[in-house]
Structures are given as C-alpha cells and as structure tokens.
Amino acid sequence: MALLLASSSVIRLQLLRSAGLEVAARPALIDEEAIRIALDAEGATPRDIADTLAEMKARKIAERMPEDTVIGCDQVLCLGKQVFAKPETPDDARAQLTQLRGRTHQLLSAIVVYQDAQPVWRHIGTASLAMRPFSDGYLGAYVDRNWDSIRHSVGAYKLEEEGVRLFSAVDGDYFTILGLPLLPLLAWLGTRGMIDA
C-alpha cells in the first residue's frame, strides 16, 4: 500500500519526507476557485471550505488508486468570515497584505485521508497570526522581491521565508501554518501501524 499526497505542494511533500515517510505526490486537479465560490454562496464556514477541498483532492486520487492511502490537504486563510485565495497578480498580493496589515487572521489547515476509496480520518489545525503595521514602502518592495514565491500562497506570504518579517505574533503549530498539521497525522499513522510508533 503506497502513501500518496494529493497535492503539488513542494513544502507538504518535503515535510512528509523529512519525517521519514515514503510518499509520492499525485496532484489532484480540481477547480478550487469554483468550489470555494460555490461553498461561499451556500454559507459554508472557512473550516468547512478547507475540509471540503481537502476531501475532494483525496477522493479524486483515491478513486483512481483505491489500493493506496491518499492524503488530501487544503489551507484556508480567513479574516473574520472573509476567505482569501492565492493572489493572481502582484496587485492582488499588495491588496491582500494591505487588508491583513495590523490585524490578526487565521490559517485553517485540513487533512483528509482515504483508504479503499473511503475517507477514514480527518483533522483541521488552526493558527492565528498577527500582522504588524508595516509601511507601504516595505509592502511594495516585499511583493516585488518575493512575487515568484508568494503567488503560490494564500495571503501572499510564506512564514518560512521573508514573510516572517510581516508578523508581530504567531499562535499555533508551525506545521499547520505551513499547510500540513503534521503531528496529528504522524500520530494517526502510528496508531494504524503504518509507521513505527
């Protein structure tokens, strides 16, 4: 039974492999933006959106490879009830960071695991991040320097890179912030006998 990550996320794959897991990436191609819009129109909470997207990714790969264990993940950034998507342009990134500046937002990182093409485990980790009131000058220069990297991240930052300079306080698990609540996943894999525990 292979362990598959239904994601193209380099950092999630790296986290799993660094923890000693033999895992392969099998990105699930779903229209995340259309699904987010539909869920938002139905009044779904940010937590429900993260969980649903993680499950849809896992299910898509599990239906093609039912003999394998498939891990689906998704991360949602919310400021109150507003859910943010990955910025499409540098102007989008500047607008998102301007909205987040001086305020505290949440990152919700969901995992759904499928075995035998059925969901068998799920977890949602939450972290709160307080962004400092940085200057417009720093904001513009930050986006210009980091656009190639931050365009792949909700909120237009990566805490593991220069984005850490945007924050005054972080409350939550580091792995959750990176998009994969790794410790609960490892604990679950251990209880199932899938890894040494």
Image (cartoon, helix red, strand yellow):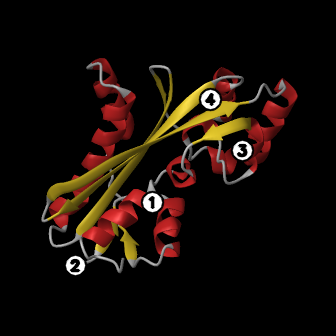
Which residue is disc 1 drawn over? 182
User: Picture coordinates of residue 7 (x, y %)?
Assistant: 39, 58
Measured in 3D between alpha carbons, the distance from the residue under mark 3 to the one under mark 2, in whole angstroms, is 38 Å
User: Picture coordinates of residue 38 (x, y %)?
Assistant: 29, 26
User: Picture coordinates of residue 33 (x, y %)?
Assistant: 39, 34
The quadrant in which residue 66 appears is bottom left
Residue at point 39% right, 66% down? 186
Q: What secondary structure is found at the residue carrying circle 2?
A: loop
Measured in 3D between alpha carbons, the distance from the residue under mark 1 to the one under mark 2, in whole angstroms, is 20 Å
The first of marks 3 and 4 along the sequence is 4
Measured in 3D between alpha carbons, the distance from the residue under mark 4 to the one under mark 2, in whole angstroms, is 42 Å
State which quarter of the image contains the N terminus.
Answer: bottom left
**Mark 4–mark 2 contact, CB under 8 Å?**
no
Whether residue 54 sits left or right of residue 156 in the image: it is: left
Residue 1 — which label?
A: 2
Residue count near mark 3 (Cα–Cα under 10 Å), binned few <14, some 14–19, many ≥20? some
Closest to the camera, between mark 3 and mark 4, is 3
Measured in 3D between alpha carbons, the distance from the residue under mark 1 to the one under mark 4, in whole angstroms, is 30 Å
98 vs 158: above or below:
above
Which residue is disc 3 drawn over? 163
Give amino acid for label 3: Gly
The first of marks 3 and 2 along the sequence is 2
Q: Nearer the viewer, residue 182 or 82?
A: 182
Measured in 3D between alpha carbons, the distance from the residue under mark 3 to the one under mark 1, in whole angstroms, is 21 Å
The first of marks 4 and 2 along the sequence is 2
Whether residue 108 sits left or right of residue 72 in the image: it is: right
The first of marks 1 and 4 along the sequence is 4
Give amino acid for label 1: Leu
